[in-house]
Amino acid sequence: MTTTALPSTDALRQRALDVLARLDAVPAEGRGVRARTPVTGESLLDLATTSPDAADEAVAAAHAAFLSWRAVPAPRRGELVRRLGDLLREHKADLADLVTIEAGKIRSEALGEVQEMIDICDFAVGLSRQLYGRTIASERPGHRLTETWHPLGVVGVISAFNFPAAVWAWNTAVALVCGDTVVWKPSELTPLTALACDRLLARAADESGAPREVHRLLLGDRALGELLADDPRVALVSATGSVRMGRQVGPRVAARFGRTLLELGGNNAAVVAPSADLDLAAPAIVFAAAGTAGQRCTTLRRLIAHEDVADALLDRLTSAYGRLPIGDPFDDATLVGPLITGQAHDAMRHALGTARAEGGKLLAGGGRRLADAAPAAFYAEPAIVRVEGQNGIVREETFAPILYVQTYRTLDEAIELNNAVPQGLSSSVFTRDVGEAELFTSATGSDCGIVNVNIGTSGAEIGGAFGGEKETGGGRESGSDAWRAYMRRSTATVNYSDRLTLAQNVSFL
Ligand code: UN1
């Protein structure tokens, strides 16, 4: 593994300030939220926390805006999102800079994240003319039965550091065309990216004639998320993060019969069958497991290789891991940037230690890089660990680049292993056998929300519904008909005859 040199914190701060200036989003200094960069591990700026009173006012403003926004025709609401998409195209490199500075993503992945935002805007604009309901055959003469989708209310979006902009865009672009307004509580670790997104949306609102209050931003810690969870004016809480966070948010929102859309942890596996094309599988596995420094909810964490191909595959993987360039995410040659914090690095070390104590064997990586150049930054070598069985640490999602490898003999056994963890987000099979591919994607195959054939577990397109089962939370965001979670269904029966006919042949009077 090679290592690339790092830029200075001053240079990164200046780069962030230049971007914010171009976006007219330079924040006032304040206290409570510290913008920092995992690239050097040092702080960039201190910003003000949103006070509980200001957060309450933000929800009130978003709720008041909802009452008028819901009456704007959906295709006109789409104009706002179209404009947002234009601005994102214009400032793609700017926003990607902030994503790299605050989340540590390599350039290509940061640009990909902004592309994902542009894609969902395009999707949502089209959707603004396709919020289709149904006409249902009524059992009564002279009656019409229809189902219409109406705007829902204020959507509280809680997002994580690892997709500091795209997850907001999935929720916000769709919520806005659905006639909802949004209050966003981003991760405390990525406030500058959030300010930039908020500012671009405010500009899009001004330029398209929409009220600015369709979107409000809250900066601060989890107390603000709790406020959204408890506030009855927030109709839907869409939360992305850990299972621990979901266990707190879910019941609080349910206690007031609010809606949730939960996008929680993944513990994603790839099955590599004997017929797999290893030239295709190996790079797909390396991207899915080591890309984004293992910090995607869709990151590949478990490899289930057939015993006939495991050694050949592991040779390729360990040799690719040995060559991974680690370091400055702004350097085009780098493929692995930093972990987000020292805590993330502690979690990785702890998981590797536990795996070894449980009988696992480290096959590659696991060390720390650049500790001398940047003692406060945490660059980790992506690790491969051979394990026997998947009890203990293998069942947990450690948000770091660790790939646990095990072998199988029959596909049924592989499917059982794929499904035998508490999480259910993404999964893959690498095979050239169509029967195996079909079985893996069938009702008796993978139990995950995302099931891929001959591609890795991460990097979903926005057109499909994104989310997973079991402890992943069950929510679906982004494409397909995920928009329905952001609307309320109204079933209307209209009697256009001059007779009263009761359903189920009931006679009365
Ligand atoms: C996440 O990690 O929270 O499928 C979202 C992917 C991306 C989204 C990941 N499109 O990897």
Image: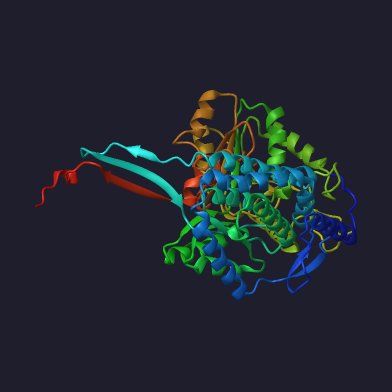
Viewer-side residue, 478 vs 310: 478
The vertical placement of 171 against 448, above or below, is below
| Image coordinates for residue 81, horizontal then vertical, percent | 62, 47
The vertical placement of 278 against 360, above or below, is above
Q: Quadrant of the N terminus?
A: top right
The vertical placement of 205 against 141, above or below, is below
Residue sitting at x 57%, y 58%:
182
Q: Tell me: 412 left or right of 368.
A: left
| Image coordinates for residue 332, horizontal then vertical, percent | 85, 42
| Image coordinates for residue 425, horizontal then vertical, percent | 55, 46
Viewer-side residue, 261 vs 194: 194
Residue sitting at x 45%, y 40%:
132
Give the colour scheme of this rendering.
rainbow
Q: Quadrant of residue 111?
A: top right
In this view, which residue lies farthest toward the left?
Answer: 509
Q: Is residue 310 visible?
A: yes
Q: Is residue 363 visible?
A: no
Viewer-side residue, 87 vs 1: 87
| Image coordinates for residue 490, horizontal then vertical, percent | 37, 49
Total marks shown come to: 0
Residue sitting at x 60%, y 48%:
173
Q: Tell me: 273 left or right of 12.
A: left
